[in-house]
Image (cartoon, rainbow, N blue to C red):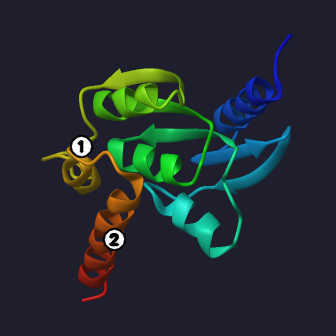
Amino acid sequence: MIDVQDRDLQMAIRLLEESSDTFVAVRDEAFIYRSKERGVSPVFAAKAENIPLFGAAVADRVIGRGMALLLAGEGVCLVYGQTVSAPAKAFLEDRGMFAGAGREVPVIVNRTEDGLCPLEAATMEICDPDKALDVIEAIRREIMRQGHE
């Protein structure tokens, strides 16, 4: 018998693969949040809209260590990524949250592909989701500040 979380995960993966969404969260066999935003933005957007991800199964296009830590902090149960970094996979496996990947890569690179993703680099040694949240928020603020200059 397939349990509800497994059905939730199957629904999330199916929608991710059949749509242009980048992030899908399902809980109790209902879609609770969908996004077309990149990176960790969907988690922050869901929080801003007061949509709790606790207990959800999440499917995402790219899961790096920063996203893995954020999802753990939000209480997500299962995580699938079309692309998952090895550090993210290890963290999720340690927490019993890893549900699979389309492909595993050594690390997530930045958008210009000339170095590590800043969130991957900044969270590589962090295991506490609350500490990771503080670090990620600071990096996001800096990126936004630079983008608005």
Indicate the amino acid at tag 1. Val
113 or 32, nearer to the observer: 32
| Horizontal arrangement in the rendering, residue 149 relative to residue 41 (left or right) | left
Indicate the amino acid at tag 2. Arg
Under circle 2, the secondary element is helix
Q: Residue 3, relative to residue 92: is it above or below? A: above
90 or 45, nearer to the observer: 90
Give the residue at x 49% y 22%: 102
Q: Residue furthest left?
A: 114
Q: Position of residue 4 (x, y in %)?
A: 82, 28
Label for residue 109?
A: 1
**Residue on which disc 2 sits:** 140
Q: Residue 85 is drawn in which quadrant?
A: top left
| Horizontal arrangement in the rendering, residue 104 relative to residue 101 (left or right) | left
Q: Residue furthest bottom?
A: 149
66 or 148, nearer to the observer: 66
N-terminal of the two: label 1 or label 2? 1
**Marks 1/2: CA distance?**
16 Å
